Structure formats: C-alpha cells, structure tokens
Image (tube, rainbow, N blue to C red):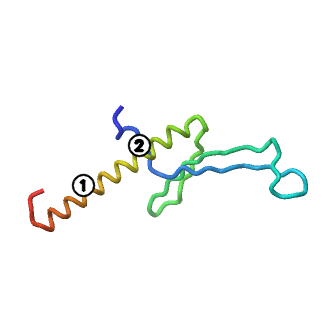
Amino acid sequence: MRIWKKLLSGILAAETEAKESGKELGILSPESHGPKYYLSVSKPKQKPVMDYIPLDYQTQVTEYLDNFRQIKTILEELCEINRELLRRREKF
C-alpha cells in the first residue's frame, strides 16, 4: 500500500495509571496499569479530540504519524523551492 494511504495527523500521548500502595508516595503495586495511548488531534477553532488507541494498534499508529510527518516535510521543501523559483521569476 502506498505511503499516502497510511497517514494520521496528531500526537500519540501515553498515560500511565499507577496505584499507590502503602503510606509512602511513589511505591507502585503490582496492579499498576499502563501505558494507555491516546491520539490527540487539534484543529483550528475546535476543541482537541482524544481517541483511545489499543496497545495492539500503537505501533501502526506511530508508523502512520511518522508517514504524515515525512510527507509534510517533503511538501514544505517543495513549497520552498517553488517560492525561490517565483522570487527569481523563473518558470515553475
């Protein structure tokens, strides 16, 4: 499958749920859970949306986010080249 079909924008956030045991803080019980992953997507003039990502999907979501960043970098480089061509009044 082509890279542009495997895209996601946003940020993958991890949250760890820890249960405290005993009276001292920082001691975690064997029942501690985590991490839990969430995809956070922000759009202008909208509240950010958080979607839970099951652990089985974490690797795939990370790959899709990386693909998006790579394509965004390529597009920014192309735009920079085109702006330079325009500045020089060359055909583009």
> Which residue lies under the disc numbered 1?
78
Residue at 90%, 52% in the rendered image: 22
Question: Residue 28's spot in the image, x, y percent?
Answer: 81, 49
Q: From the image, which quarter does the N terminus lie in?
A: top left
- What residue is at 34 percent from the left and 41 percent from the top? 4
Report if the CB atoms under discs 1 and 2 are less than 8 Å apart. Answer: no
The crowd level at tag 2 (other Cα within 10 Å; few <14, some 14-19, many 20+) is some
Residue occupied by mark 2: 7
Residue at left 12%, top 56%? 92
Q: Secondary structure at mark 2?
A: loop
Q: Amino acid at mark 2?
A: Leu
Residue 55 at x, y percent in the picture:
61, 38
Helix, strand or loop under label 1: helix
Going by the image, does 26 lie left or right of 49?
Answer: right
Q: Residues within 10 Å of mark 1 (few under 14, many from 20)?
A: few
Q: Residue furthest right?
A: 23
Q: Quadrant of residue 67?
A: top left
Q: Amino acid at mark 1?
A: Leu
